Image (cartoon, rainbow, N blue to C red):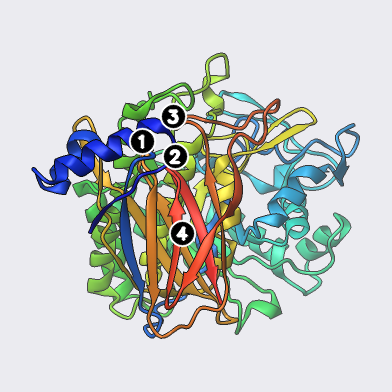
Amino acid sequence: MILLKSTNGPACSILSYITKRLTLLIPPLVCLSLICTGSTFAQEKVQLSVDTSNLGARIDRNIFGQFAEHLGQGVYEGIWVGPDSKISNTRGIRNDVVSALKAIKVPNIRWPGGCFADEYHWRKAIGPQRVVTLNPNWGGVIEPNTFGTHEFLDFIEQIGADAYISVNVGSGTPQEAAEWLEYLTTPQQTTLAKERAANGHAAPYKIAYLGIGNESWDCGGNMTPEYYLSQLKIYSRFVRNFNPAQQDKQQMLKIAVGPGGGEERWTEWTEHIMKAWQNHQWSWDMNGLSMHNYTVVRWPPAFASVGFGETEYSQILKSTLDMESLIDKHSAIMDKYDPQKKIALIVDEWGAWYASLPGSHPGFLAQQNSMRDAILAALNLNIFARHADRVRGANIAQMINVLQAMILTDKDKMVLTPTYHVFKMYVPFQDASFLPVTFNAGSYTHGDITLPRIDAIAAKDSAGKLWLEITNVDPNNSVEMETSLNGINAKSARGETLTAPKVDSVNTFDAPNTVTTKPISVKIEGAKVTFKLEPKSVSVISVE
Ligand code: AHR
């Protein structure tokens, strides 16, 4: 239904009058498209209904995971400043960053890479004497190895996250990986356990996820699916987790390398690994298949991360929606060999990849983060939630100072990005149960690009509270929402929204709150909850 509303200001009143006259002569829809392109004049009332009786899959909190690679200023400067730094730190780890990450309840962090992981040798980064090496993947800079196993595990303990460690399959050996796992997890007094204790940690560590290689079809060793499968079987056999607390419950999940796109070579890859898993012997196993998918439009990344207009806004958002068909495609292959969905699809690298910031080191992948990225994050998180039965983990690339980051730092300064705010708003969805929603998304058109105007998900948390997320993709028009919650008599409702003046608005060290959240007014009218979405906004509403 199209509702015409007159709003503030004389210009609007005049337009409203003209429109009312025109509606007598031509249908309202035509009238709308002819005249009412401004944001304050005409608004559709979008009906959204939540099927509260139909609890779906649990939205695994691990879809809100992060990725921290030894790349640019992601680890050094972003996390690690060293114990002697003037920047406030705990055992070398920045306190400002820790407290910001605690607030978004980061469930797990994938480390040490990325491409870096397949050239990483863990022994060079433990103990008092660190081996200084190079980082050939990312600018060829010095890798001091001052942030190693113990520092990473200290960091995740400080923020309350789980460890997702990727072992080196590309240039390492099964023995090196197996010894790392023994060093990390055995409670018995082996030589490696004693070395761990001497380095400050007598108790075994908990490792929630273990990635067996990274992009082994490319930077991880240019392997064919056949060759990778043979490696997977060997590594999977020998990377044992000895931590007694992880034997029955909380078992370490082994994640195999999966696809990096939708092309034929990656559908073959998924087929090959999943088919082998279906008939696997007792002596090897896996629990997840990784998938990587960046929003880039075309390689090499050329879109600017700031200083762009609506054309680039709509192009990037169109491209990011490909995530849905990609997940559908690989899930369908997985369903063939694993109808019970035992193997999780873990989207452990995703996000926007733009041109490096002018003047920055091209190997450091530094980019700004705008309102567009907030919308992009919400759209992807909603896609993961809609596939919660199969997508049980995801890691945005990358957490600090690299690609689509949560946090940017410059020496002692720190700023939270629009993407950070989205992750904070979505905290209530962590481990909540998915609820189906029905709504008419409508459309937003710019040039030759047409996108769904609205996206939404709903979930119920363990306390029975209902949560709604609604994204208004349209950067020019607000939307009136009318939500019916079958079977629920709402007593109270509240919400917050994230929006900004422009599609490329960013937070900077000098102006850190240009893109930030504010309360949204939510009304309960009988069995309906109504609220207004601002243009280009991400909103989260709770109903009790
Ligand atoms: O996130 C940057 C890089 O992108 C990772 O190192 C690699 O896995 C991917 O190609």
Which label's residue is closer to the chain start, 3 or 4? Answer: 3
Q: Nearer the viewer, residue 235 or 114?
A: 114
The first of marks 1 and 3 along the sequence is: 1
Residue 531, labelled with which disc? 4
Visible residue check, residue 347: no
Task: Determine whether, in the image, residue 362 is placed left or right of residue 250.
Answer: left
Q: Residue at x 38, y 27 (%)?
A: 301
Q: Is residue 277 above or below residue 34?
A: below
- Number of the front mark, 3 or 4: 4
Instruction: Report how far apart the C-alphas of labels 2 and 3 lie in the structure.
Output: 39 Å
Characterize the local packing of mark 1: few (<14), some (14-19) or many (20 or more) Cα atoms within 10 angstroms: some
Q: Quadrant of the C terminus?
A: bottom right
Tell me if I can see residue 182 in this picture: yes
Instruction: Say if 325 sits above or below 513 in the image.
Output: below
Tag 1 and tag 2, C-beta contact below 8 Å? yes
Query: What residue do we see at 85% from left, 62% from top?
Result: 197
**What residue does disc 1 label?**
12
Q: Which mark is residue 8?
A: 2
Please state the horizontal and vertical placement of residue 508, each as a whole percent of the image. Answer: 64, 28
Disc 3 target residue: 354
Q: Residue at x 38, y 55 (%)?
A: 480
